[in-house]
Image (cartoon, rainbow, N blue to C red):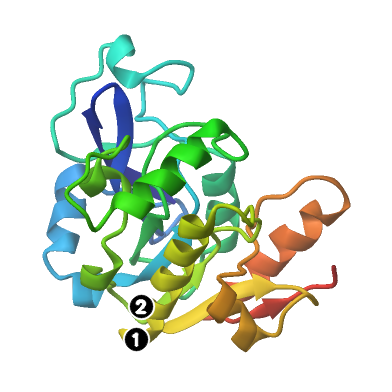
Amino acid sequence: MQTFGIFSTNFDHEYLTKHYIYINEKDENREDIKISIQDLKNLLKKKSKNVAGTIFLYNPTISPVGYNNNSLLEEQGFEYSDDFDELNFNDMMNIFSKSIRDGYRGKLIEIKYLFNLNKANIEPTPILEELDADLDKYNTNQLTRYDKTLNYQDYLNMSLNGKFVYFASGHKYDRHHKEIIKYARNIAAQAVKLGKDVYFTHDNNYDADECIDVAYFLSPLAVGKIKEKRINAFQNAFRTYPPTIQKISS
């Protein structure tokens, strides 16, 4: 698997505004056939043919090859060119590379985020208060803390390519962050409205239909005794193309 993205910055905040993973085809020696940035662009010229679907995550923490997430990319000498860079793998991409294989080879999957802010551990932090306040102002002329275009999904005008949307954006929302909850629900509802098949992993807390209404989608990443359950569920979901809904025990 390879992963590519475009980074942007505004007012000392860093955003991953586009992100795709590519599931490599194999050569006669069963080695991955790598693609270049130009190959990626050529594939994106025919998104309807080459993009299998979309996976939604919470927010990115990832860096271009040759850089890291220990400091802002600008401080490391990175130049924001509004062009694609090949990216390093993080924990989520490692799970994807081991899970999304046959049936998806030669295809791109777009990765979208609730928040494009490229920063580790934003939940739970004071950043969530800022995001919630921003979303309350989103459809007004008021200034927001984070860039409206770079950080947030304009869900009413959201473009989704491919057959499916797989939500892996998480399920823990603080009750008082009402705008974040509404935002996550609206994105899920819009995916359904656009006619996409929606898939995810859930548990006994909600039935599958309820999960879409309340934006309750378990992340493949977890710690402790449920770690392997979450990973296995994600792998099982992507054993088929398109994927499937998975239910695990709490």
Amino acid type indicated by mark 2: Gln
- The answer to whether residue 82 is left or right of residue 78 is left
Where does residue 9 sit, x and y in percent of width and height? Answer: 23, 29
Mark drawn on residue 150: none
The numbered mark at residue 193 is: 1
Q: Residue 138: x percent and y percent?
A: 28, 53
The amino acid on which the numbered mark 1 sits, given as a three-letter code, is: Lys
Image coordinates for residue 27, horizontal then vertical, percent: 39, 58
Label 1 SS: helix
Q: Quadrant of the C terminus?
A: bottom right
Left or right: 128 as drawn, with respect to 173: left
Residue 241 can be seen, yes or no: no
Picture quarter containing residue 55? Answer: bottom left
Q: In the rendered image, which residue does mark 2 sit on?
A: 190
Which residue is drawn at the image coordinates 42% and 79% (left, top)? 189
Seen at 73% across and 49% down, the residue is: 222
Q: Quadrant of residue 171?
A: bottom right
Q: CA distance from mark 1 to mark 2?
A: 5 Å
Residue at x-position 64% and y-position 52%: 174
Residue 4 in the image: state x and y as whole percent.
31, 44
Against 209, residue 45 (above or below) is: above
Q: In the picture shown, does residue 82 fall above or below 95?
A: above
Give 9 or 93, whichever is nearer the viewer. Answer: 9
**Residue 135 at least partly seen:** yes
- Name the element at disc 2: helix
Marks 1/2 in contact by CB < 8 Å: the verdict is: yes
In this rendering, the answer to whether 64 lies above or below 168 is: above
